[in-house]
Image: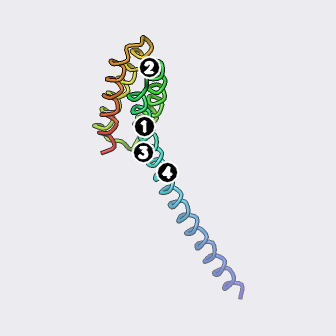
Amino acid sequence: MLADTVRASEFCFKKIKIIKIFYSCLLIILLSSLSACLAENHLHQAIRYSEAAIMADDGKTISKHSEIAKIHALLVQNQKNISSADRIHMAVGIVSLDQAIEKGKYEADDSARKAARTAMFHFKEVRQ
């Protein structure tokens, strides 16, 4: 009788251990999926703010939108799940945003828009 009780409790402990492993694996999969979704969201925001910079009326607004786009682009670049080619596009886009920010501060609107357009192009290459 006692031996049956011990076997039954060992079986329950094994079941619980398997369930814990299953839920741990499920949690890891969900977190990695969430990380990919966040990267896509930041990339989308970088593109949107780059587009807003292109449409802006004055240099200060171009500069502000470019700064926000740069923040999102840097968050994408820090993700581990992007390829080396995408990292290059992100780096070139960030440099272009730096140029848009500087040129926007000096009211060189056309040059700032061109730099923001270049950044947007590179960010869209990452999305493809």
- Determine the residue located farthest toward the top in the rendered image: 106
- Do residues under tags 3 and 4 come within 8 Å of each other at their CB atoms? no
**What distance separates the C-alpha of mark 3 from that of mark 4?**
10 Å
**What distance separates the C-alpha of mark 2 from that of mark 1?**
17 Å
Give the amino acid type for the residue marked by disc 2 in the picture: Asp
> Which residue matches tag 3?
40
Q: Between disc 3 and disc 4, whose residue precedes?
A: 4
Q: Look at the picture and state if 110 lies above or below 53.
A: above
**What distance separates the C-alpha of mark 4 from that of mark 2?**
37 Å
**What distance separates the C-alpha of mark 1 from that of mark 4?**
21 Å
Q: Between disc 1 and disc 4, whose residue precedes?
A: 4
Q: Between disc 2 and disc 1, whose residue precedes?
A: 1
Disc assigned to residue 58: 2
Q: Mark 3, mark 4: which one is toward the viewer?
A: 3
Quadrant containing the C terminus is top left
Asked if residue 79 lies left or right of residue 23, the reply is: left
> Which residue matches tag 4?
34
Quadrant containing the N terminus is bottom right
Estimate the x, y position of residue 19 in percent, counting from the top left: 57, 69
Asked if residue 25 lies left or right of residue 113, the reply is: right
